[in-house]
Image (cartoon, rainbow, N blue to C red):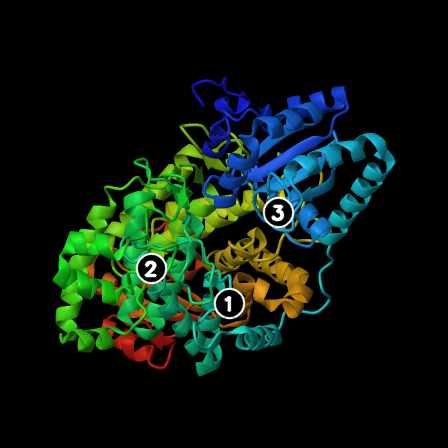
Amino acid sequence: MTEQRQPNRLIKETSPYLRQHAYNPVDWYPWCEEAFERARREDKPILLSIGYSACHWCHVMERESFENEEIARLMNELFVNIKVDREERPDLDALYMAAVQAMTGHGGWPMTVFLTPDGVPFFGGTYFPPEDRYGLPGFARVLVGVARTYRERRQDVQQAGRELMAHLRRLHDVAPSPEEPTADLMDLAFAHFSRTFDPDEGGFGGAPKFPPSMAVNFLLRYFHRTGRDEAREMVERTLQKMARGGIYDQLGGGFHRYATDARWLVPHFEKMLYDNALLARAYLAAYQATGNPLYRRIVEETLDYVIREMTDPSGGFYSTQDADSEGEEGKYFVWTRQEILNILGDAEGDIVCRYFGVTDQGNFEGKNILSIPREKEIVARLEGLSVEQLEEIVERGRRILFAARQKRVPPHRDEKIIVAWNGLMLRAFAEAAAVLESDGYRQVARRNAEFLLSRLRQEKGLLHCFTDGVAKIPAFLDDYACLCDGLLALYEVDFDLRWLKEADALAREMIERFWDPQLGGFFYTSSAHTDVLVRLKDFFDNATPSGNSVAADVLLRLSRLLDREEYREKTTTILRLAREGMSRFPGGFGHLLCVLDALLSPSKEFVLVGEPDAEPTRAMLRVIHRRFLPNKVIVVGRPDDDHAPEVIPLLRGRVPSSEPSGCTVYVCENYTCGMPVVRSEDLEEQLVGTGLQR
């Protein structure tokens, strides 16, 4: 069909999602002034469709409606049609999603919004079927009805738009609470998570279940703060159930987007870079806190998957992998029992099938999503094997099945490199490099930082994403905040001052471009984004942490590293702005709750004087990283480096070890230091009773 059609304007776009629609019979425009000018000239409403390349239902709506000649004819006749990639323009997505949620009470993708020629929304929804079904009106009927309303009831349309815009402005004009943020907000959050926790399957609430990485991090901190064992139990139950479920790719590593059921068995099969970044960090923290080798394995398999399948040769990380392959959701990942027996042979194949819960009937549309429904001790006993024998057979089977799966048609990969998501993954690799002592992960992190700073950091400011050699969209708040976040983590791995200086420069630029001087807090867009109707402020931690919560975290850490009180004050302002929301809906502020814990907890500062890569220094760092110390700061200064103390006040006046290759460590709390130590055993003794230790 694409060979017979002429492409529309989207063929010239860099977004893979937009190019997927380039041969639709719809007369699509990208988001541009030309489309709005035409709408004004012809007095037509705008049909705005927002989605992303890995979205299953976006593909469904394309096949059913945007490829339908009659529906496309109606769209072209009645509307000016604009297609937007939500990952390229998260600002537009946030604005119009808030409008759709206000109009309908829910949101999601694909999102369909009808606008006046000035961009003001007046009607919208998410997925519409081509004909009436699922209790939804057919898309053709919606198109005709909306166009008629626009023609015949113009005043009603304009009034609805005015009221909606006023609502959106009120929603984001929040004044700071007069009260300082206090620890009772964390107690409220713990009570909320306790009430909604699923004691059987882990996670919070029922189906569908999304991976609660930020809640896990908060609960680990809460356990560290209070010793409440229930917090640790919630964390461990959730992480173990997810690791054994179908939401985790049992062959290739990495997590799918979410589970459609309460047991983590049946996923929505797309894989998102940000999910895997956040979950790798959650499992890594749990490994520090408990020493459970399962968590280490999940971290390594997840990061190795990212290196293998989601890393550009230049060092950037790709954004998503599709849910579908060959037009079917999950086809790449599922198996029949007979397929496995044919590949592994009947004897070992039968054992592997029992281990992964594979049956003739299947658990997903007649096929099998691999999961681990039974403890390995039970499977070993049923098969008459030792646990070690079972593990050997399963590991061999995994390798063979993975190699066989590699020959299938893979899901589409969206190769956009998004700065915010790269920043999240940069931090995951940097922290894993430190905790797991992996030079390989450190090199991946360094290459990523080099790429982001060389290709997306420009004199006019940071850019949002990079596709096919092109970077053109000004960065948003979370791009600045998450890149700062990753650079700070990288500094605490290789102690190159460049990363710290770049993070500080980005933080200053972020404040200049996004900070609200009237009410405080950060807008999502800067003054460089001239084509949005309202500058929104978001504090809610959703699939990713909000820009404000990451910015608050970054500024607090920088304040401790660089002794910048003005940064700490901005963190406090953000928490005061979000205080009411945190008290009413604590489940929606997982990352900001971690920032609150950091603000209210004593800061543990480790000041090391020695060569960063020398074994005495590495031995000291090993002792520190063995513990779960979420509020720590680590700085290292070389004995002969006079510049580092000028940048980092914590290094000033620190005397190195008398041994030429030794390392001296000062353990400080809130800028007050104890006696220096020069042996890792002495540091270990000084830290007894400090933090959770694996």
Q: Residue 358's x, y, as percent?
A: 28, 62
Of residue 28 and residue 98, the one placed in the foreground of this image is 28
Is the Cβ of the residue at disc 1 closer than 8 Å to that at disc 2? no
Image depth: mark 1 or mark 2 in front: 2
Name the secondary structure under disc 2. Answer: loop
Tell me the amino acid under the disc marked 2: Gly
Distance from the alpha carbon under mark 2 to that under mark 3: 28 Å
Residue at (57%, 63%) from the top-left corner?
589
Distance from the alpha carbon under mark 1 to that under mark 2: 46 Å
Q: Residue 462's x, y, as percent?
A: 50, 37
Q: Is 657 rendered above or below residue 53?
A: below
Q: Which mark is residue 557?
A: none
Q: Which mark is residue 133?
A: 3
Of residue 55 and residue 351, the one placed in the foreground of this image is 351
How many marks can you see? 3
Camera sees residue 664: no
Q: Residue 326's x, y, as percent?
A: 36, 39
Which residue carries the number 1 mark? 598
